[in-house]
Image (cartoon, rainbow, N blue to C red):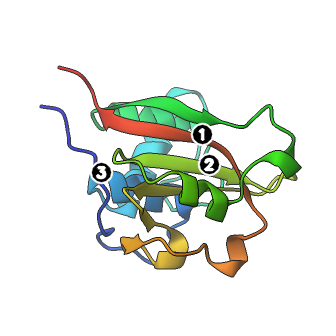
Amino acid sequence: MASVFNLRDVRDWTKDASCTPTALAALTGKTPQEIGVLLAEIAAEDGRVIGPELRQDYAPKDWLKAVNRLGGDWAVKDDFRSTPFADRPTINEWMAANSGVEPELVICDDDNGIAHVFATDDGYVVDTYTEGRRVRFTAVDPEYEFLRVKYSILVEPLAE
């Protein structure tokens, strides 16, 4: 049976949970630690060795495979990768224009090597700055204002 992807508080969230395990745990009900183990397994299948400890540098191809492994499918919704950085929406701008009712992963960066992902659904967000809690989005934490949205991904159960 396909798992249900919806936004929820993250179980067993800790300060060492980076954005990727936090976002994936928020959509799946798994713990960040379970997500870390899964991401390590996926990397190993691709010939890369990473430990199960929570880290900051997960490859997007790994976490997209994790969505599939957890019974989900994904599709790019908004794609700003070919848009000049200065013309891409900020997180606040993107959230103001996107209050969709399907779970999404939103990938952001600073155009200089710093990347971030968070989970959102229906105007709510789960992120590291929310400490893994599902909260109504009002504005991004000031620490993240320099980031701009690169692309977003809809996440849904696999069709049976």
Return the x and y of residue 107 as percentages of the image width and height.
Answer: 62, 48
Q: Nearer the viewer, mark 1 or mark 2?
A: 2
Three-letter code, disc 3? Thr
Q: Are marks 3 and 1 in contact (CB under 8 Å)?
A: no
Q: Amino acid at mark 2?
A: Ile
Q: Nearer the viewer, mark 3 or mark 2?
A: 2
Pointer 3: what residue?
28
Q: Position of residue 139 (x, y in %)?
A: 58, 74
Residue at 77% over, 57% down: 114
Q: Quarter of the image holding residue 29?
A: bottom left
**Mark 3 or mark 2, earlier in chain:** 3
**Marks 1 & 2, CB-CB < 8 Å contact:** yes
Q: Is residue 144 left or right of residue 117?
A: right
Q: Which mark is residue 107?
A: 2
How crowded is the residue under tag 2: few (<14 C-alpha within 10 Å), some, or many (20+)? many
What residue did someone put label 1 on? Answer: 60
Distance Cα–Cα, label 3 vs label 1:
17 Å
Q: Residue reaching furthest left?
A: 1
- The answer for how far apart the CA atoms under marks 3 and 2 are is 18 Å
Residue 80 vs residue 34, the one in the foreground: 80
Foreground of the two, 116 or 120: 120
